[in-house]
């Protein structure tokens, strides 16, 4: 008995496994539920891999009734559920299509020549074996078709459906090709135009500072248009393209030509990749991503839930941390509850639902296509599907399918009302309509869906005004989540249209913080960028701003010059106000020069006092003591005029500086010239009757001083009358300082004054040099010669040094030259005499001199008395 029970149990299990195996493999062309009006739905649920040569030959043979799927896309079954949910709501709605039941036919839709044609012919023919140009469907039941994951599929089916004027409402991404009313007059697109997508992506790139981007687009008209618009906008915003790759539309999975581009992703220098295009191109990217793992890249794409249908069961998926832009949509009331509660038992005709349930829960419910297989756990629901097949999150296409069903229902409702108003009672009882009658109403339909959003099929009014920015998160066990991290509002003012919550973003593996994607690192403040020849504008070299130039922003095109009254800081990123400066008495240099000038002034006054006290001695009387007094007073004024050059300049001091300098030095040099001529006249006179003696006795040398001074006064007067000195600023001599200086005014007049003074000095030096060999008893010719040599040397050295100096140094150099030349005159002429007066006083009398030396001739004694 036990063996019999065991045999029956094993037989039952074997039968269940065989039934399950049969249910998983067996497919029919469509899922059908009858109704007063029937809507067709074409959704991509599985893929049939077939050699392209066989596909072309298959048109010559009768297609197989029973087919096998090579790959299932269970994520897309949400499209079917959204289709069912909308029809279920409408059938329960007493206000919309009352007393009319909507039925459905569901077909598989994959862009693959013969399969697309096959599904369309099944819809038109209504037979197991499709027969072209033959329609045996129930009269006036078939109303419209909802299809179009891709534009290619909509175009292929639309060409056939147009023969019967069947309207087709597409739920895939908007494609401009399908907007051609001459080529596709019966196709209506549910998705709005994505013309603002470029602006949304650019805003995201600018938000994170990504200026070096790789672009992957499908190789079709839609991809070309997007690429052109994106590049044009990127050019305006200073974003460069590192790599452009076009993805071929494939009709055979795992074709070698479809995945060769994946190797280029790894070598791309950009860390941010933009992905855009048709599903037929993008699906290959997703599948190949499992085999070509590319971590460390941030992907930016559109409607990620729809275009990426395959997920690897690990966190290192290539799209982990990516961004997707999805048109903003409202939550459909009741849809989530429908997904949680619906089971295959409620749709027994749908073998897709039975296969999904059996595949993921390893059981089937009574009443399903597979029959009862195994025992399902309590509360089995689609809510507990694996993470990589999450059906609970409403996708964009599902939302468009829901709206498409309602759009057709509103159109049918309006047409039936019109028919009931104008037709007879017998016709009003027949709800059937001709497909072409829907077109005028579809073009003008506008309603508000249950989520509160206005829906229209008019392409002129359909534009995406708001995008949801989602971040893709892949967790262990295949759990994939789309987390909303921001929004883009096209109609908001610039700078406020992007809202991003950076704290919610999960970056790809390999990044611990916001990644960078630039060709060249940004040039910080203090630097400017120079483009690299032959490379995009985003590739540049940073150079430090030159002197007196700054840049206070990142990636400055050029450095800006600071105003004259400001200077640059060490980092060359700010202009700082310059400090007003001048050669002041408080400066160490100014203080030193002041002390030197005062010391020499005191010394000159002391020497003058000594000469006045010993005015009757021979050495003081020699060479005209009046000239000595005048020379000492002029030297005293020379030392004191140095103080005019120290301190904050003003107009008066600027004028007095040059006037005093020119006149007192002219007097001093004139005195030296007069003393030199006096010596020459004294030693050249041979007799008292001679004319030379008369000139000497009349004091002719004394007239040299007023004459020379009058000439210098004339030059100074001309200078002051034409272009006098004035207050000026020197902002370049010292870093961070503005030096207040006295501008000479007319440089020509200044050099004339200086040249005239030099001519007097040269003349004095020449005359003194000629008299240096005369008897040296009280003869100061040698001292005058040496003093003028020092004077000329100082001022000859002064000119080149003065012109090579700047700012306060230039003023200090002029003061030093005045002090040095004046000190040279004082020391060379008067210090020897002071030595004789104070220390060698015995030599300071005529008697002492005669007793110390031999009489050298009566002529010289007479000359001494004449002095």
Image (cartoon, grey):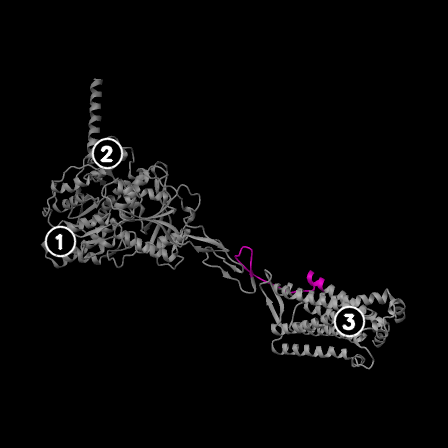
Q: Which mark is residue 632?
A: 3
Residue 364: mark in rendering: 2
Q: Position of residue 145 (x, y in %)?
A: 18, 49
* 698 relative position to 264: left or right: right
* Residue at position x 49%, y 61% in the image: 560
Q: Are marks 3 and 2 in contact (CB under 8 Å)?
A: no
Residue 165 in picture, x, y percent from top left: 14, 53
Q: Is residue 781 magenta?
A: no
Q: Quadrant of residue 754?
A: bottom right
Distance Cα–Cα, label 3 vs label 2: 129 Å
Q: CA distance from mark 1 to mark 3?
A: 130 Å
Q: How many other residues sit within 10 Å of disc 2, few (<14), some (14-19) or many (≥20)?
A: many
Mark 2 and mark 1: Cα distance apart in space:
40 Å
> Is 811 rendered above or below residue 335?
below
| Residue of label 1 | 434
Could you say whether the residue bearing mark 3 is in a helix, strand or loop?
Answer: helix
Counting residues from the start of the chain, the first of labels 2 and 1 encountered is 2
Q: Position of residue 287 (x, y in %)?
A: 29, 40
């Amino acid at each position: 008995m036990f063996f019999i029970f065991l045999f029956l149990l094993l037989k039952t299990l074997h039968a269940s496994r065989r039934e399950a195996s049969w249910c998983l493999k067996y497919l029919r062309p469509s899922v059908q539920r009858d109704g007063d009006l029937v809507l067709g739905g074409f959704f991509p649920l599985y893929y049939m891999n077939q050699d392209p040569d066989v596909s072309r030959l298959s048109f010559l043979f009768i297609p197989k009734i029973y087919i096998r799927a090579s790959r299932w896309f269970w994520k897309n079954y949400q499209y079917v559920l959204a289709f069912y949910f909308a029809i279920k709501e409408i059938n329960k709605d007493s206000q919309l299509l009352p007393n009319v039941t909507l039925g459905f036919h569901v077909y598989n839709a994959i862009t693959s020549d013969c399969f697309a044609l096959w599904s369309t012919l099944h819809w038109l023919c209504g037979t197991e074996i499709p027969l072209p140009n033959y329609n045996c469907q129930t009269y006036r039941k078939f109303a419209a078709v909802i299809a179009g994951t891709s534009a290619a599929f909509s175009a292929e089916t639309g060409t056939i459906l147009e023969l019967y004027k069947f309207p087709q409402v597409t739920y895939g991404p908007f494609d401009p090709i399908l907007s051609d009313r001459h080529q596709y007059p019966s196709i209506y697109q549910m998705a709005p135009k994505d013309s603002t997508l470029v602006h949304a992506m650019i805003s995201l790139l600018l938000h994170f500072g990504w200026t070096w981007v790789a672009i992957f687009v499908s190789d079709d008209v839609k991809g070309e248009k997007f690429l052109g618009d994106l590049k044009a906008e990127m050019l305006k915003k200073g974003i460069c393209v590192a790599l452009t790759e076009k993805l071929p539309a494939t009709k055979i999975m795992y074709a070698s030509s479809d995945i060769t581009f994946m190797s280029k992703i790894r070598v791309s220098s950009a860390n941010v990749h933009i992905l855009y295009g048709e599903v037929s191109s993008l699906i290959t990217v997703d599948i190949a991503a499992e085999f070509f793992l590319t971590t460390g890249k941030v992907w930016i794409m559109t409607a990620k839930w729809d275009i990426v249908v395959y997920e690897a069961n690990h966190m290192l998926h290539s799209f982990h941390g990516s961004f997707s832009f999805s048109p903003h949509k409202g939550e459909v009331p009741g849809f989530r509850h429908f997904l949680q509660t619906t089971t295959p038992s409620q749709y027994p005709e749908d073998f897709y639902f039975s296969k999904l349930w059996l595949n993921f829960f390893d059981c089937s419910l009574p009443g399903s296509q597979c029959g009862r297989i195994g025992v399902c756990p309590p509360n089995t629901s689609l809510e507990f599907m694996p993470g990589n097949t999450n059906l609970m999150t409403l996708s964009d296409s599902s939302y468009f399918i829901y709206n498409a069903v309602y759009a057709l229902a509103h159109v049918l409702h309006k047409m039936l009302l019109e028919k009931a108003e104008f037709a007879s009672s017998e016709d009003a009882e027949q709800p059937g309509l001709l497909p072409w009658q829907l077109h005028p109403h579809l073009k003008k339909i506008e309603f508000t869906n249950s989520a509160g959003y206005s829906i229209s099929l008019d392409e002129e009014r359909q534009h995406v005004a708001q995008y949801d920015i989602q971040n893709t998160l892949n967790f262990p066990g295949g759990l994939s989540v789309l987390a909303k991290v921001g929004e883009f509002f096209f109609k908001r003012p610039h700078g406020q249209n992007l809202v991003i919550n950076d704290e919610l973003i999960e970056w790809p593996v390999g990044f611990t913080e916001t990644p960078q994607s630039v060709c060249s690192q940004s040039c910080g403040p203090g630097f400017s960028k120079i483009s690299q020849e032959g490379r995009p504008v985003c590739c540049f070299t940073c150079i430090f701003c030159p002197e007196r130039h700054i840049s206070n922003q990142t990636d400055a095109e050029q450095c800006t010059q600071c105003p004259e009254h400001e200077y640059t800081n060490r980092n060359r990123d700010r202009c700082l106000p310059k400090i007003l400066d001048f050669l002041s008495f408080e400066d160490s240099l100014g203080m030193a020069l002041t002390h030197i000038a005062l010391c020499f002034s005191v010394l000159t006054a002391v020497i003058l006092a000594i000469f006045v006290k010993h005015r009757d001695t021979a050495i003081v009387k020699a060479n005209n003591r009046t000239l000595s007094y005048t020379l000492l007073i002029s030297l005293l004024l020379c030392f004191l005029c140095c103080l005019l050059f120290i301190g904050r300049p003003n107009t008066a001091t600027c004028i007095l500086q040059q006037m005093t300098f020119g006149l007192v030095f002219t007097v001093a040099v004139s005195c030296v010239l007069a003393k030199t001529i006096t010596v020459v006249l004294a030693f050249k006179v041979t007799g008292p009757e001679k004319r030379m003696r008369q000139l000497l006795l009349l004091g002719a040398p004394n007239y040299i001083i007023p004459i020379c001074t009058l000439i210098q006064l004339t030059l100074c007067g001309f200078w002051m009358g034409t272009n006098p000195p004035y207050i000026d600023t020197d902002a370049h001599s010292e870093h961070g300082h503005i030096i207040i200086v006295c501008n000479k005014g007319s440089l020509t007049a200044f050099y004339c004054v200086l040249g005239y003074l030099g001519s007097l000095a040269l003349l004095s030096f020449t005359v003194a040099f000629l008299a240096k060999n005369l008897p040296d008893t009280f003869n100061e010719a040698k001292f005058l010669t040496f003093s003028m040599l020092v004077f000329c040397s100082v001022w000859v050295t002064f000119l080149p040094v003065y012109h090579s100096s700047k700012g306060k140094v230039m003023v200090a150099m002029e003061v030093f030259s005045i002090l040095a030349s004046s000190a040279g005159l004082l020391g060379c002429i008067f210090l020897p005499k002071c030595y004789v007066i104070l220390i060698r006083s015995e030599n300071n009398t005529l008697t002492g001199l005669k007793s110390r030396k031999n009489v050298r001739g009566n002529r010289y004694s007479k000359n001494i008395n004449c002095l």
